[in-house]
Amino acid sequence: MPASPVLPKLVGQRVKRREDPRLIQGRATYVDDIALVGMQHVAFKRSDIAHGKIRKIDTSAAAAMDGVEAVYTGADIAKMLPPMPIGTPFPSPEHRAVAVDVVRFGGEPVAVVVARDRYVARDAVDAIVVDYDPLPAVVDVEQAMTGKPAVIHPDFANNLAVPLVPSGTGVTLDGKVDDSAVDAAFAAAEVVISQRMVNHRLAPSAIEPRGVVAHYEPGKGTMTIWSSTQNPHILRTFIAALNGLGQDQVRAIAPEVGGGFGAKINIYAEEYVCSAISKALGIPVKWNEDRSEAFVATTHGRDIIGYVDLAAKRDGTVLGLKIRLIADIGAYNMLLTAAIPTLTMMMANATYNVQAIRTTLTEVFTNKTPTDAYRGAGRPEATYFVERAMDMLARELKMDPAEVRRKNFIQPNQFPYTTQMGAVYDSGDYGKALDRALQIANWEQLKKERDAARAQGRLVGLGLSMYVEVCGLGPSAALPTGGWEHAQVTIERDGRISATTGASPHGQGNETTFAQMLADQFGVPIEHITILHGDTGVVKQGIGTFGSRSQAVGGTVMHLAGAKVKAKMAKFAAAMMEANEDDLVFENGTIAVKGAPASAKPFAAIAAYAYVPVPLPPGLDPGLSEEAFWEPANNTYPFGCHISMLEIDRETGEPTLLKMFAVDDAGTLINPLIVEGQIHGGLAQGIGQAMIEEVSYSEEGQLLTGSFMDYAMPRAIDFPRFEMASTVTPTPVNPLGAKGVGEAGTLGSTPCIVSAAVDALSEFGVKHVDMMLRPEKLWRIIQSPRQSSGQGGRS
Amino acid sequence: MAKIVVTVNGKRRQADVEPRLLLAHFLREQLRLTGTHVGCDTTQCGACTVLVDGRSTKSCTLFAVQADGSEVTTIEGLAANGQLHPLQEGFWEEHGLQCGFCTPGMIMTAVTLLADNPKPSEREIREGIAGNFCRCTGYQHIVNAIQHASKKSALRGDRAPELKTR
């Protein structure tokens, strides 16, 4: 492999983003900015009950309104579209894009309007009358597992989407389970920590809601679909399949995309419906999600209960771990829904050398919006359960939370390390990250500050958390979409460079980082490079941006495609300069013979020669454009340590985050400025989950947090200044050494904050408190009689 | 329909609008100034913030007819004579944006923040942008961007925009 492992110059520098000029001037094009001649607007009538039979839908008043082009019920749409597919091999109930007979969550579409503009479309939606026979709403996940108060899908007894699946020590591929090692670990335990923990439901809440423009051109028989998506190629695959078109007949475009956070991986009902309607009517149609629609129609994240048991010796050595997971996945399986909680199982080993682990997973249907990937997708949940248990162990043993962790770390000389869950951790040095975090937080001093504050009667606590996550997804064996990425690098005739990537950035800055890499690789100015993405008509193949994979997988294949075209260009240069191609250096916009700078030819001159090759060097074809597919042999496993200091107001119970420290090891960094931004954003989402964000439903299955008036989005005043550092442990999985960083911030921050809250409340004997840290909940703990054990209850 | 006259980015615009048309939709769909974004329906997110008569205003909270006779500045009108506004420079220099969707509103809010308080403390900046949501950045680089602009404006001796009251 012609890898240049450590690239000097721009790689590793804090290069300003090339995306920004259009974004800071209002010149970018998001989906809702697209207007096509003759375009009509789509709006959805949505169920306002959680569970019920549709008795009758009256669309006559809507259809009669001026400006209304068409009205469709679920039965009409069912004639145009097959049921929605999923991307995992799990069994799945039939899921119609628009409900036909039964609605299973509040917000499920029941009818569709096409009209002149978005105002008329909404008027028409309001004029549709739906008559329901309500059914009991299934809301409590543990009650749902008994089939009470109703069974949502007849073929899934007791609402079990995935019945108990075991994993870990003693579980073989054929499903045999040998509990002897786990049982022995618990039998040998001197201390056992047991705790039920809830990792609650969240709304991903990209500030740009979803949107779609679908344009079927009957004359050509082709479809163009613009969507606010993280993965246009996957969108193309599914849109083609459900509309009976070939993939060659569909062009999917992700224009500027205003954030995704995992929720824009899915292929949604609205995308299918808009494409089918455009095809049926032969006109372009647009749908843009309202925020209140987004709260019900865009997948939620997390929502998993963990019953955690941890066995240890009194010196802090962890002997065994059991986690029984119950995931509330909502009303239907979406693209990756069923797979997300399996990542929680996969990461149960965390950063620790634990030799006996049993996890089990049950996934359960409820009458709620379906869950799917949300930043971290299964790994923050694993981190939360294990790190909270480690913290409880430290508290039980009166050990420093840093030391109990250090005692159990997988050691640097143990990598590659095969976990009890079957993951192969690529590289790591957890002690180094811990040490760095203790150093930047000034841990000993911080403890003194806490104690001094307590002496004044203040409720101040410290929290510490390690994390390791699985990123750079991944080999195709691990990813139903395929785990590779694609790139094509073209040296244009004028010596400038166009490069396409199958990654589909929506804030990650790949137009900058990939250009940094190519600028170094070819020794040309970054201004001469354009990175193209997000359009299947331009980018031949791709998977997309999720699972912290763009740099580790997309960046690597960009580098490899660059190396291929560079090798060909060197042959042209060698022929022109009568030199040996192995003796050439690409630098400063020239190609020269090593050690003979006077021989330098302009980069552009060699490019021009390759396109008018007179004479054509033997064995060469004209042109300079090479593509590459590449799939990593393994995932990458970034890691780090987060520390927080939190104060709880004794009078009101209101928590305030005073300090937040983060040390992250994402391997080799291409652009530390962008990496910092990624970590900041992840921290904010993790802190948001721990402290203020929560999707909640009433007993009737009504969403109680259906707008930004009710769902607490973190604001600038909710955060202290984050203090950060990094350690660098390159991965051997790819030639760049980069591991991925997009999700990291969400992993360590949540347990670290909850542990700080528990520490702050230690005088009340509290051992655990569930997220989020609602002041009322904390106030009740402060007001309650002193407890010797127990927890903050089930929020 | 109602007749309105609004001066947008220095240009006088006359239009017939439905009384219920939001200013945000008027700007985006009738004038095609799509830099002003709509991120919610309850006036929380601030992505639609523009200047109305020199003051930052959430344009989803105003009907177009209420802006009749006003001067409106959108993100497209902020750079002058090909020169980025110090806040635009600050956001670029300090990596104050990722997906960019909240950015126009965030910048337009910060215009009024700095006009009212040219040298805000970090706390004052965080409070000043509390009506604007960003899901990508965790706000730290946005704070840096506004601090950058504050310093730049002071160096350049920029005058605060003239404040008008209606």
Image (spheres, rainbow, N blue to C red):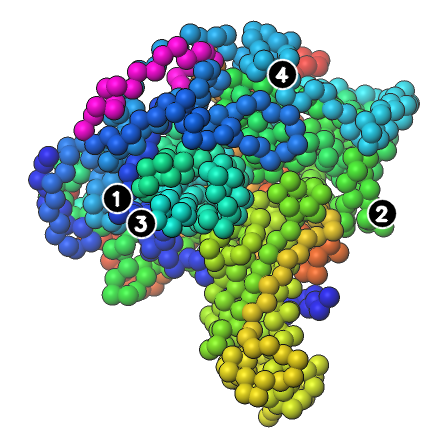
Please say whether residue A386 is visible from this viewpoint: yes
Which residue is rendered at x = 36% and y = 32% of the image? A290
Identify the amino acid type marked 4: Phe
Give the percent coordinates (x, y) of residue A531.
49, 62
Which residue is rendered at x = 56% and y = 63% of the image? A488
Where residue A156 is drawn, which disc sits there? 4
Crowdedness of circle 2 by 10 Å Cα count: few (<14), some, many (20+)?
Answer: some
Return the residue at label 3: B35
Q: Is residue A412 magenta?
A: no
Q: Earlier in the sequence, mark 4 or mark 1?
A: 1
Which residue is rendered at x = 24% and y = 36% of the image? A116
Badge 4 element = loop
Name the foreground residue: A231 vs B139: A231
Work out how far the residue at label 4 is from the one at label 2, CA to CA, in angstroms: 43 Å
Q: Is residue A443 left or right of residue A205?
A: right
Asked if labels 2 and 4 touch by Cβ distance under 8 angstroms, the answer is: no
Work out how far the residue at label 1 is from the one at label 3, CA to CA, in angstroms: 23 Å
Return the residue at label 2: A414
Name the foreground residue: A642 vs A447: A642
Work out how far the residue at label 3 is from the one at label 2, CA to CA, in angstroms: 52 Å
